[in-house]
Amino acid sequence: MIVAVDGPVAAGKGTLARRLADVLDLAYLDTGAIYRAVAAKMLAADADPNDGAAAEAAALGLRPEDLNRDDLRREAVGQAASIVSSQPAVRAALLAFQRDFAQRPPGGKAGAVLDGRDIGTVVCPHADHKFFITASPERRAERRHKELRARGEESIHARVLQDLKERDARDSARSVAPLRAAEDAITLDTTDMGIDAAFAAILALVAPAEPSGAS
Ligand code: DC
């Protein structure tokens, strides 16, 4: 079983996808972490994320341990990841790994949950279930701001909102694999929905409970 969970930054897709994988014992891949790892390597090497050749080289040279870097969740890395990921050669370099993970999940798992921007549209267009998780920019900025503060990072709400809108615009406007819901995706707006309610809604669609008394 392949489950695709797409959506913009801080809509709750990562939490929902990870939880779904846990509950159903499926493998989980945070595809944003792959783009973040490419960006983090470039920033660490003082390379410009807009430099297409350097970005492609960083993507082709990506190793599994790069996904464990502890700077991946930083705001600067997220912004650089958005720039890096708009380059077609970078996306092409990372596509096979993502598809392979979905088709042959590690650990002998019976399926995989992938979250990102283009899982339902490009990486796994034949996924069994597709979700597009969204929320208003203001609510997402509020969540991201709290998350950054909780991690001890400096954060100014207005700045977070502005960065988030910039990232949404870049992720949506790029020519290759832009952020958008697949036509057959179910959209869930979490602006006024708690994470538990959102999770229950998804789980009910992916693994409907057997009616009691059914033989
Ligand atoms: O989900 P995230 O914030 O960790 O993603 C970081 C950036 O990576 C995001 O701004 C766009 C890019 N990305 C992408 O282009 N395609 C994906 N499948 C996942 C992330």
Image (cartoon, rainbow, N blue to C red):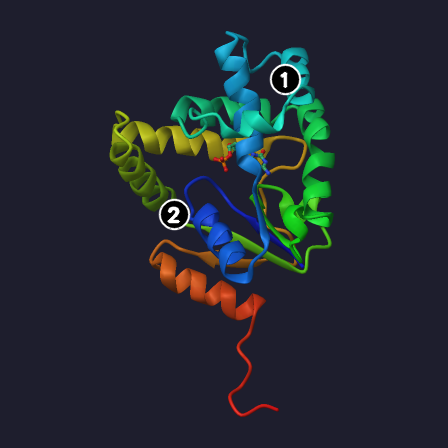
Q: Is 211 drawn above or below residue 37 in the view shown?
A: below
Residue type, numbered disc 1: Ala
Residue designated by label 1:
58
Residue designated by label 2:
136
> So how many labels did they put on this image?
2
In the rendered image, residue 3, in percent from the top left (x then y), is placed at 61, 55
Q: Nearer the viewer, residue 154 or 134?
A: 154
In the rendered image, residue 97, in percent from the top left (x then y), is placed at 70, 35
Secondary structure at badge 2 equals loop
Q: Is 121 drawn above or below residue 63 in the view shown?
A: below
Sequence-first disc among 1 and 2: 1
In the rendered image, residue 155, in percent from the top left (x then y), is placed at 27, 28
- Quarter of the rendered structure image containing ligand 1: top right
Side of 10 relative to 91 (left or right)? left
Secondary structure at badge 1 equals helix
Side of 15 relative to 117 (left or right)? left
Residue 99, image quadrant:
top right
Side of 123 relative to 46 (left or right)? right
In the rendered image, residue 49, in percent from the top left (x then y), is placed at 55, 15
